[in-house]
Amino acid sequence: MASGNHAAERLEAMLAARRLAPGDRLPPERQLAAELGVSRASLREALRRLVDLGIVEARQGSGTYLAPVDLADLFAARLRIEPQAARLAARRRGDEQLAQLEQTLAELRATERDAAAFAAADARLHEIVTDASGSRALRVLLAALADLLRHSRARTASDDAVRAAALTQLTALVAAIRERDAAGAERAMRAHLRAVARGT
């Protein structure tokens, strides 16, 4: 059976695929557990995790509903952190980290039509950029946002146009990091985040 964390990730992906709006009621637990292929206990643990994150809310005697997630606030935080990570990555990246970025960019191209796989590759690319920055503080800050970032990506990656634009933007980002163009990398990351925010 899936763990609570894994079940939470799968549940988030399912909710994003169904394009539920804030305030929409989730299907009953029995149905969700069957669709996800998890036990009721794992599902309840996953729901508790999403409640703690503010992604869903439980209403006594009524059910579980998709809660409003302030993506604008999340992107505002990312705009303060990730462009700086990209700038530092262009200056500090090693050959191995560049190779990882190139490989992950190739995965993004190969999975452009698969929303879940694209979101996973996108997450890896951002993690590599943060690691390449060499900044422990930036790594800690972004790690603290990991669950909300995963939820955000599950929603944005479900849009074909957003995925296509993101691929172009991330290609420019990797090119700037490859050329050790710190200002260009910062601009590319900022443009990417702003474009994704507009698509939410």
Image (cartoon, rainbow, N blue to C red):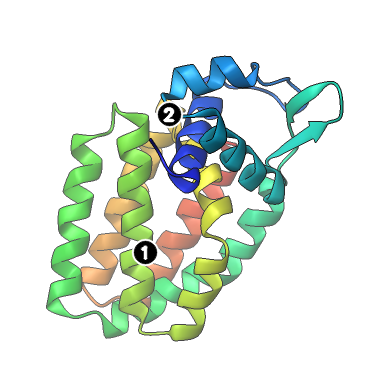
Residue 172 sits in quarter: bottom left
For the C terminus, give its image quadrant: top right
- What residue is drawn where x is 28% and y is 67%? 176
The N terminus is located in which quarter? top left
**Where does residue 151 sit, x and y in percent of width and height?**
54, 43
Residue 127, numbered label: 1
Q: Where is residue 114 in the image (x, y as percent from the top left)?
A: 30, 28
Question: Could you classify mark 2 by the number of other residues whose Cα lies within 10 Å: few (under 14), some (14-19), or many (20 or more)?
Answer: few
- How crowded pointer 1 is (Cα within 10 Å; few <14, some 14-19, many 20+) is rated as some
> Does the rendering let one see residue 15?
yes
Residue 184 in view, yes or no: no
Q: Where is residue 142 in the image (x, y as percent from the top left)?
A: 51, 68
Q: The disc labelled 1 sits on which kind of residue?
A: Glu
Tag 2 residue? 161
Camera-nearest residue between 8 and 194: 8
- Callout 2: SS: helix
Q: In this view, does 92 lie above or below 185?
A: below
Amino acid type indicated by mark 2: Ala
